[in-house]
Structure formats: C-alpha cells, structure tokens
Image (cartoon, grey):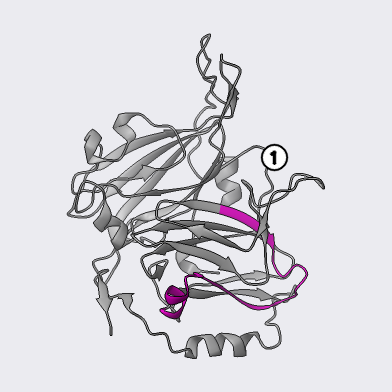
Amino acid sequence: MDKNNRGLSRRSMLAGTAAGVLAPVVVSASAGSAPAAAAGMTRNITIYADYVPGSTRVGYGLEPGKPTIPGPLLECYEGDTLVIELVNNTDQRLSIHPHGVNYDTKSDGSPFNDSFNKPYETKTYTWKTRTAYQAATGFWMPGSAGYWHYHDHAFGGDHGTVGLMKGLYGGLIVRKRGDLLPSKQFTVVFTEMWINHQVAPNTPIFEANLGERVEFICIGHGNLMHTFHLHAHRWADTRTGMLTSATDNAPIVDNKTLDPGNSFGFQVIAGDGVGPGAWMYHCHVQQHSDDGMSGVFLVRNADGGMPAGAQEAIDRFKGHQHSTTSTPDATGASAHHH
C-alpha cells in the first residue's frame, strides 16, 4: 500500500475514536431556514504543515515533521463538524481551504477573507456538513455527501498556487450514513504532469488482495486537463461509483475527466471478473501518459501472494522509457527535460 497515502484510520475516524470526539452536535432550524443534519459528531483534528525533509516541498501531516503528499485523507458523515487545528511549522504563510463543506469567512482559508496562518502560527478552521433538506419552496437542496478535497490557498500568493505546486493538498470524504465502507483507500492527485508529485516509474503502486473492496479518491490540480483511467475495472458514474438497484441506468465508465479543482471517487472490487494481476492506471491524454503520468494497481492473490506474471509486469513498467518533460525535482519545482 502506498506509504505516502496514509491518513486517519477510516473506521476510527468515522467512529470518532481517533479524532478527539466531543459531544454530539444537534443544531435546530428555525422556520424557513435550512435544517442541519441529524445529530452529528464534532471531531477535532490537528494537522501540521511542514517542509518535506531534504527538500523545499511542503505537505500536511498528522504528526509534526512528518508531512505526506497527498496529505491525510479526512472523512466524516453528513451532519458531522470537523474542527481543524492547523499548525504552520514553516516560515511562510499558508492555509487549508476545503471543497464541498460549509464554513464561515474566518474558516475560508484564503487571504481574500484574511483567513490563513502566519509563519509558525496555529489557527483553527471549522468545517460543517449537512444532509439534503427540503426548502420552503419545495425544492430539495443538496447535502454535503461526496468525494471532495482540501488544499492551501495562501502559500506564495493569494490563490495558493505555489503551495499546490509544493504538495499542500489532500482528500476529503463526506459520507451518507449507510454507505458501504471499503477495505482499502487510495488518493490519486493529478497535478501538472505528476501523480502524487511523482512521475513514472516512481508513481505509487497501490495494492489490494483479490476480492477486497477498494476506494479511489481522484483529485485534479494545476493548469492541465487530465483524465483518469483504470485498467480492467469500471464503476458507475454516480456519487459512490455503485448502482443503487438492478434498474439503475447510470453510465458505467472506466475513464473520467479530471480537470483542475475537480474531484470524484468510486469503489471497485479488486480483480472482480478479471482476476489478480498488475493493472495500469494513468492519464488518457496520450502525451501525458507518455511523459510519466501512469502507475500500477497491483491486485494480489486472495491470500496476499504475488500473482503469476505480476512482478514481471512491474519490472517492465519500471524499465519503460518515459520521455519526461516535467518532473518534480528535490526542491518541489519543475525540472524540464528536452
């Protein structure tokens, strides 16, 4: 499993045992206002922003001095509140800005609202979620459930562009109660010509055993349009990647556009119908794939053993000649090769 993709334990976070749960939050709604979700939990999470050792890249982490790129995967249920204590251990201003959840201007995480951490400052950001509700007009308003993400919005400029290029980003999932929970989770971030700030053959190898329920969280950043394609596996183009019934006619896809700022997620059963093996995932913009935007999804045997031919496929992948045009160097900048 990708060691740079660790986050809070899914079950412990959703159950509230690892994230410092406080008392359940119940918010009443006045007539004509949007009802909050049913009773939810308030979860306190401390995140540290640090330079990656040996470089000028910067990442978010759950322990001081141990940033990961992507940052920790955060999860909650609709109705929960996340209270994020962000500790800035760098000499630059930075922030944390979420997509898909509710927050006030103080928790916006952008210089526009004077919401950021000064160098070495600790600041609290509060994100709230809610279920779908019926407005006074009779129309239904959306809840917060979805595959979202968070990122810096202040490092090096008012839009956080430098922070994103250095690695300040991570995944955020808001679930509906009753959603199926996976056994494995992988966050895949396409930024410029990088996957999780790496290019082939150094991109992550994601691993699962045959038959395990696997969840992919896909996020786009940077300035380039991408697509995400997974070999031999497909999913429904729905909120969860699953069908709701035998008559659900949602489109079934194995390739989906991943533009900057977009995010989506889905679940698959590893090797379902195709068996174990080494399967590629990559950007299907052909020049991007040629230039290193590809990786390996290794489906092991059900007992965890290496399937026949998989190691040879991985060796061939690592031996491919990638005409890399933009690779992240030790400083987190782009090194261009011609």
Q: Position of residue 262 (x, y in %)?
A: 45, 51
Depicted 210 relative to depicted 175: above or below: below
- Where, quadrant-wise, is the N terminus in this rendering? bottom right
Q: Write the residue at 24% across / 34% down.
A: 113
* Residue 148 in view here: yes
Q: Pick the residue in front: 247 or 55.
A: 247
* Residue 330 in view here: no
Q: Amino acid at mark 1?
A: Gly
Q: Write the residue at 69% across / 70% down.
A: 209
First to last magenta residue range: 265-291
The outermost residue toward the right is 246
Q: Pick the residue in front: 174 or 85.
A: 174
Q: Position of residue 157 (x, y in %)?
A: 19, 50
User: Quadrant location of residue 303?
Assistant: bottom right
Secondary-structure class at tag 1? loop
Depicted 5 relative to depicted 320: above or below: above
Q: Position of residue 307 (x, y in %)?
A: 70, 83
Q: Pick the residue in front: 137 or 125.
A: 137
The outermost residue toward the top is 31
Tell me how many marks there are.
1
Residue 273 on the magenta segment = yes
